Amino acid sequence: MADGVPRIADEPSDHVCAGCCMGKMREDNFSRSPEKTVKSAGVLDLIHSDVMGPMQTKTPGGCTYAVTFIDDFSRHVTVYFMKKKAEVLEKFKMFKADMENATGRKIKRFRSDNGGEYAGRLFKEYLSKQGIRHEKTVPYTPQQNGLAERMNRSLVEMARFPTP
């Protein structure tokens, strides 16, 4: 036991760890108009996506990045781990095939930031050929893709502060 560090058993059960609270702090909410908060009308009408990484710790498979795909209507989340950001298009193709086969519906819109993994020629051409409209957020405004950003924060918190 380290000097000056209390034993967990000695802490009251309602004790709040200051470090945990600071680690979970975030900026104020982004104000948005009520009409923008309406969910999509159906499954796969809108997919939100974001890339996390590089992460400090690699997965057992050697991955340091993750990409999330979230259906706006159902809030179904799919996470793929990657070794390089360049794998995003490959992971999106897998996600698209799995979800469209499972639901019998087609993806209509895709929302992401302007990261190079989404802004590249191959990704743009693929979306265009598939008839998917790409909605890109304004630079330095992650709040416009809040669903994906919030999911990323939740995933990081689960990894950092696992519950027993």
Image (spheres, grey):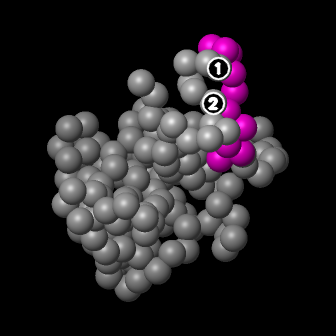
Q: Residue furthest bottom?
A: 121
Q: Is residue 131 visible?
A: no
Q: Is residue 160 above or below residue 136?
A: above
Residue 162 placement (x, y as % from top left): 45, 35
User: Is residue 18 inside the magenta stretch?
Assistant: yes
Q: What element carries label 2?
A: loop
Residue 75 placement (x, y as % from top left): 45, 36
What residue do we see at 43% from left, 65% from top? Answer: 56
Q: Disc 1 or disc 2, which is closer to the eye?
A: 2
Q: Is residue 66 left or right of residue 161?
A: left
Q: Is mark 1 on a helix, strand or loop?
A: loop
Q: Which of disc 2 and disc 1 is earlier in sequence?
A: 2
Q: Residue furthest top?
A: 13
The answer to the question of whether label 1 and label 2 lie on touching residues, with beta carbons closer than 8 A, is yes
Q: Is residue 83 left or right of residue 124?
A: left
User: Is residue 21 inside the magenta stretch?
Assistant: yes
Amino acid type at circle 2 is Pro
Q: Is residue 163 left or right of residue 58?
A: right
The residue where tag 2 is placed is 6
What residue do we see at 67% from left, 33% from top? Answer: 17
Q: Residues within 10 Å of mark 1 (few under 14, many from 20)?
A: few
Q: Is residue 140 above or below residue 11?
A: below
* Magenta residues (range): 12-24
Amino acid type at circle 1 is Glu
Q: Can residue 153 be seen in this view?
A: yes
Residue 1 placement (x, y as % from top left): 51, 37
Marks 1 and 2, Cα distance to the nearest angstrom?
7 Å
The residue where tag 1 is placed is 11
